[in-house]
Image (cartoon, coloured by chain):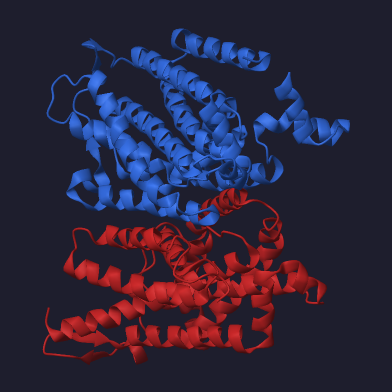
Amino acid sequence: MDLSTFFIQILNSVQYGLLLFLVAAGLTLIFGIMGVINLAHGSFYMMGSYLAFALSPIVADSFGGGLISTLIIGVLIALVLGYILEWLFYSYLYERDHLQQVLMTYGLILVIEEIRSILVGDDVHGVPIPDWLSASIQLSEVMNYPVYRLFISGVCIILAIAMFFVLTKTKLGMMIRAGSVNREMIQSLGVNIQLLYRLVFATGIAIAAFAGMVAAPVSSVYPGMGQGVLIICFVIVVIGGIGSIRGAFIASLLIGFIDTFGKVLLPEVAGVLVYIFMAIILLYKPSGLFKAGS
Amino acid sequence: MKKSQLVFLVILLFSLLVIPFWGSEYALDWTTKTMIYGIFALSLELLVGTTGLICFGQAAFFGIGAYAVVKISANQTTPETMYLLPISILMAGLYALFVGALSLRTKGVYFIMVTLAFAQMAYYVIHDTPIGGGTDGIYLYSKPTLLNWPISSSITFYLFTLSCLILVLGFLGLITHSRFGRALSGIRINEVRMRAIGFETYNYKLCAFVISGMIAGLAGYLFAVKDGYVNPELLSWHLSGSVLIMIILGGLGHLRGALIGAFSFALLEEFFRSEFIFGSFAKHWHLGLGISIILCVALLPRGLFGMPALIQTKFLGAKNPDDIEQAQDNN
């Protein structure tokens, strides 16, 4: 592998890892704080991609908006949807055991997939890259790297930093972290835990949908795309330690590298490498690299 | 054996023995398939209902059992059940040993996610590598015989499946009433206490995991021989999810619950898929299934099996459903 290919693969790994981080962060936060295993989290990623596909022509026709306004509108829709779903459905899951959570969110996946099939159909769609991001950077005579992938990495890094900042430096973040440690205690200190939960949940959903939206132009939009992401994110959460944002970040990047380089160097076994890595981590650290709460 | 169990067994046996003589070919095929799912559900019941381990990757063992028979019998003209079946079961058991040894190091939610991830791993191996023949799957060229006696006709295979079901039911019944089974129940209720009184709980759990994987492998074997065809969907997490739904629908903690669940789930699926009732909307049958899964888990936390007790508490003002079920068990 020559240097420019190597360089491109590194950029690809980082971009894939950061994208996974956005989905995994929501999953691990929702579990860490509310104690709900949200199997349907991948479906919100899928929903984001379909939103990008369905919204971009509407946004362009109505007021000539481009990618940015599509992203904003999509995130707002996802926030509202997350808020409503928490109120209608997820708030009933907090008191139930993991088995019932798994099954009910599994039922939700089937429902979301079928609604998608009814509304948009089962075809594979492509989403065009906007003109101002469609350029490529020439790395060597035959190799070039699309600017849009750099854009994805950039946006993901900004979001990740914003998440770290909110969680570690602000009062809201303090309440969220406290809520993940002791729910009753923070409630008795006068924090509206119900609203806090609803907020965290809606944000987690919106971030997953956002990840789906930015990924849509490079990954194309197809049915069942959320499930692959969901299972990889489970692996990330297990490796990183449930409830740990830092763990999820590091595990996402590791998985990004393993998967991307695995596909280049050992294409025969690439699909399995990630799981083998998880097995090795489990042998040495059965509860993940980082404990929850850090 | 308790009276209610005996009544259930007699009804089950009678109705299952009646079907081949009066039912149509379709009914026979449907019942065979559902009995196989029943065996599959029973295998998971040992883990979830008895031991309290929520395995979300049970389909991997089912699929491995199915793929094993197709791969091994590929070059044989008259494959023999007497050695194919044990090999299938052994293959599934070996993978269960590998998955169990690793995933049992974790607890709770981790265990759910890790079993799911390992099942996905098996899925990708079958799906992506030449071993499994890709998305298209592989055909089983010649159906196995039992001691040189052909069991390929639908009635003989039905009876063969029925006897497997009864054997599995009896075997699991023996296990749950043995010292080993009592220890598994103890682990479900309070694992720390079990360790404190000197049980090496890891070994017990691993043993239960392997037995469960082997029974799932048996179900997979039967499925592959019945259809004469395997594809990677047999290992998909949808199947793992469905079989979990079956045992919840039936009611956890009872072997009968797993069978009731398998049959009601199959009926539910049949209902939502029927074009006779839903017309062209029947192709969106997952919608109805998903909604009924959510409703069933929300409204019937103890499954169909716990329904009489639930009705008694809700409408007849009786005590806690746990007490009633306890009383039923003591009779």
Is any part of residue B233 visible from this angle? no
| Residue B267 x, y percent position in the rendering | 55, 30
Residue depicted at 44% across the width and 86% down the height:
A157
Q: Is residue B209 left or right of residue A200?
A: left
Above/below status of A11 relative to B108: below
Count of labels shown? Answer: 0
Is any part of residue A147 visible from this angle? yes
Q: Which residue is nearer to you in this view: A264 or B134? A: A264
Q: Which quadrant of the structure image shows residue A219?
A: bottom left
Q: Is residue A36 left or right of residue A232?
A: right
Residue depicted at 30% across the width and 32% down the height:
B90
Residue depicted at 74% across the width and 29% down the height:
B326
| Residue B306 x, y percent position in the rendering | 70, 32
Residue depicted at 48% across the width and 28% down the height:
B38
Q: Colour of chain B?
A: blue
**In the rendered image, which quarter contains the C terminus of chain B?**
top right
Q: Colour of chain A?
A: red
Above/below status of A245 relative to B35: below
Q: Is residue A261 left or right of residue A88?
A: left
**In the rendered image, which quarter contains the N terminus of chain B?**
top right
Above/below status of B75 relative to A232: above
| Residue B286 x, y percent position in the rendering | 52, 46
| Residue A63 x, y percent position in the rendering | 53, 87
Furthest toward the right, the residue is B317
